[in-house]
Image (spheres, grey):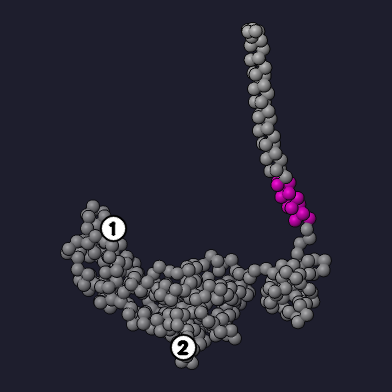
Amino acid sequence: MAESSEDRKTTYDVYDYVFSLEEQLRTVETEKQLTGARLAQMQIEMERMRKELSEMRAVPLVMGTIHEVLPDKTVVVKNSNGLEFLVKAAQEVEVELEPGKRVAMNQRNLLITKVLPENKDWRVNAMEVIERPKVTFEHIGGLGKEINELHEAVILPLTNPEGFEQLGIEPPNGVLLHGPPGTGKTMLAKAVANRSNATFISLSGSDLVRKYIGEGAKLVRDVFRLAKEKKPAIIFIDEIDAVGSHRFATANGDREVQRTMMQLLSEMDGFHELKGVKVIGATNRLDMLDPALLRPGRFDRQIAIPLPDKDGRRKIFEIHVGRMALDSTVDMAEIAELTEGFTGAEIKSVCTEAGMFALRQNNKRVKLKDFNDAVQKIIRQPDEAQPEHRMFA
């Protein structure tokens, strides 16, 4: 019996209804999955808020410093008020307990719950700290003798300490570089750090001069502590005369500077041996330094960094013009002859100014005339420190 058109229509309606239900089911399942994901996210957020609420309700911990660790694992702790307490420590922190470390204690029973990291002065982190400087001795010209002295006094003790131990001698603790400004003292210190693969920590003597009592001395301690953590390390103190000048019975401000210097002396040659750390100081005024800084055991080596001679000036010029496009008329020996009395920094400035003269004239190469004009410009700059014998026709 043939199926009527009405029966076929009814069958199609049933199929459409089933497909519609299946589509609705898939939609509901998708919404269920989305709702489940949102629920999981809300549960995570609720747990986070519960944790924050619990931390906000927690009683603040008391800060203290370990004074002594007794054999029975009890600890003598001094708090910020200066009072001492005999307390116990949680089992998980017992292995970290050492005299001098900062700890956090529960307010109710003074149980040590946490050992805190070293308290470093934030100014130390703001100083120039380079894991390994990029400056090498190839960037420095005319200081062969001075480089050899630095190699013996700083690089060898850092790279081959066993050699000194076998000979039974103590290497120098510090080196003092003195000479006119711009002669390359800072570059030498960076090149030494590069050759010895040491961390370079640079600061100025004026950074150690502080207003309030004890701030400068604390900063010195933190600098040396940072150097010991990153050893081998080189501490470079520029303008060390700002904190190491002669001591006199003067005002309170100067006495604070003297306290800072005494802390520096203690760190360089105190009870604790300074292994893997070398101090390089730099000054333009050697005559102003206190004799206590210059005695053996502190700045053992004093290296004068002079103005470069003719051959040294030529080498410095060759270093700075290495990437410059020069005209064939440029003779480095002739320019070196004209720049008698110039420092390395001034020679670098001459090269820069010569390039600027060529740029103004749209020249593709720097000519000898550009160098002559640059030399004349540097000489005419107001600088009372420049000797009169630099003037020439």
Q: Position of residue 161 (x, y in %)?
A: 47, 84
Query: Is residue 45 within the magenta segment?
Result: yes
Circles 1 and 2 in contact, beta carbons < 8 Å: no
Residue under label 2: 164
**Nearer to us in this view, 256 or 201:** 201
Q: Amino acid at mark 1?
A: Met
> Can you say which quadrant of the picture contains the C terminus?
bottom left
What label does residue 24 carry, if any?
Answer: none
Q: Is residue 76 above or below residue 31?
A: below
Mark whose residue sits in front, 1 or 2: 2
Say what secondary structure mark 2 lies in.
helix
The range drawn in magenta is: 44-57
Image position of 257 (left or right of 373)? right
Q: Earlier in the sequence, mark 1 or mark 2?
A: 2
Q: Is residue 63 visible?
A: no
Query: Going 54% across and 82% down the picture, which residue do you hit?
Result: 274
In the rendered view, would you say 52 is above or below 338? above
- Identified at 49% across, 84% down, the residue is 173
Q: Secondary structure at mark 1?
A: helix
Question: At x 72% / y 69%, what residue is drawn?
Answer: 92
| Visible residue check, residue 136 | yes
Estimate the spatial distance between the alpha carbons at disc 1 and disc 2, rounded to whole Å.
Answer: 51 Å
Tell me where residue 29 appears, x and y as whole percent. 68, 32
Q: At label 2, which amino acid type do we have?
A: Phe
Q: Quadrant of residue 209?
A: bottom right
Q: Residues within 10 Å of mark 2 (few under 14, many from 20)?
A: few
- Residue 262 placement (x, y as % from top left): 57, 82
Dominant secondary-structure state across the stretch colored magenta: helix
Point out the image quarter for the N terminus.
top right
- Would residue 272 be counted in the magenta stretch? no
| Residue occupied by mark 1 | 356
Q: Nearer the viewer, residue 217 or 33?
A: 33
